[in-house]
Image (tube, rainbow, N blue to C red):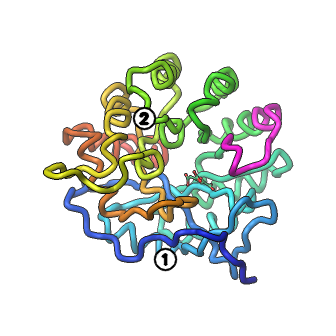
Amino acid sequence: MESTKTPGWLDWYAGPSRPRFELPAGAVDAHCHVFGPGAEFPYAPERKYTPCDASKHQLFALRDHLGFERNIIVQATCHGADNRALMDALIHSGDKARGVATVRRTIADQELQDLHVAGVRGVRFNFVKRLVDFTPRDELMEIAGRIARLGWHVVIYFEAQDLPELRDFFTALPTTVVVDHMGRPDVSKPVDGPEFELFIEFMRDNPNVWSKVSCPERLSATGPRALDGEQCAYRDVVPFARRIVETFPDRVLWGTDWPHPNLKDHMPDDGLLVDFIPHIAPTAELQRKLLVDNPMRLYWPEEAR
Ligand code: 0GY
């Protein structure tokens, strides 16, 4: 089935540069997606957008081009709770990808087991209102209880202004909890202001909470252009991501977010995104934790050092 992409949808960047920053051996891109292809894996009827296709082969080619060894593929909302495209990508990755699925409370134990065998190690709860319809908290808590027994974790996606209302629910989750994109801070506000302080406190008070320090391209107002003599794109995001990396070095992950759904102004060059990493993780030790040790501990614990 052919589907027409959402008007204004930006296609992913077809010719990414080769990063100047050399990733450490064994680096994991811990947040990326596959979209369809729609003819093989139709998009969900309840989706809020229709993307361009972004296949597993294209994702794996990007992985090799950038110098990553593995991927964490996160179920995107355009596929709803139909995880077939995700499972297909995991199964064809040669054990170089693990996944985060979306499930409903009606899922059977056997289906959860099948997801586990394919490589799924977490579920995603999405609270971003433009992306999903509301799911009752008791349903999410029931799912969290079931997947906890498989040793999985919960990935949460929300916007900074909603943390005060959601915090008690997050704190009650019985698993490791991974926050997407630093809880989407407003980076025009001060890094030591009350809003971001609340996020730091949330991580400090809850040692089971991790954060992806990803998506500068989504959060930045200064954008991809470096200033004269300054080599860093998305420079307004640096203090926020760096503060998290330096404060919680053992609980951070990084990912490209390829193929970058819902960007309106520009599509990032993924090579440039990789070059952002040393600005937020300035030492080799921080880089190794962020890109290798932490994702391996969470997704391939049987191989982690
Ligand atoms: C992301 C961000 C977004 C979309 C999704 O599943 C999704 O549709 O996650 C967004 O629009 O902010 O992480 O890819």
**Label 2 secondary element:** loop
Crowding near the residue tagged with mark 2, few <14, some 14–19, many ≥20 C-alpha atoms within 10 Å: few
- Residue type at the position of mark 1: His
Q: Is residue 125 visible?
A: no
Q: Residue at x 66, y 69 (%)?
A: 6
Q: Residue at x 66, y 43 (%)?
A: 128
Answer whether residue 129 is magenta in the image: yes
Residue 216's spot in the image, x, y percent? 40, 47
Residue 110's spot in the image, x, y percent? 78, 54
Q: Bounds of the magenta span? A: 126-142
Task: Give the farthest residue toward the right.
Answer: 106
Which dot, 2 or 1, sits closer to the camera? 2
Residue designated by label 1: 57
Q: Nearer the viewer, residue 17 or 101?
A: 17
Residue 127's spot in the image, x, y percent? 68, 40
Crowding near the residue tagged with mark 1, few <14, some 14–19, many ≥20 C-alpha atoms within 10 Å: few
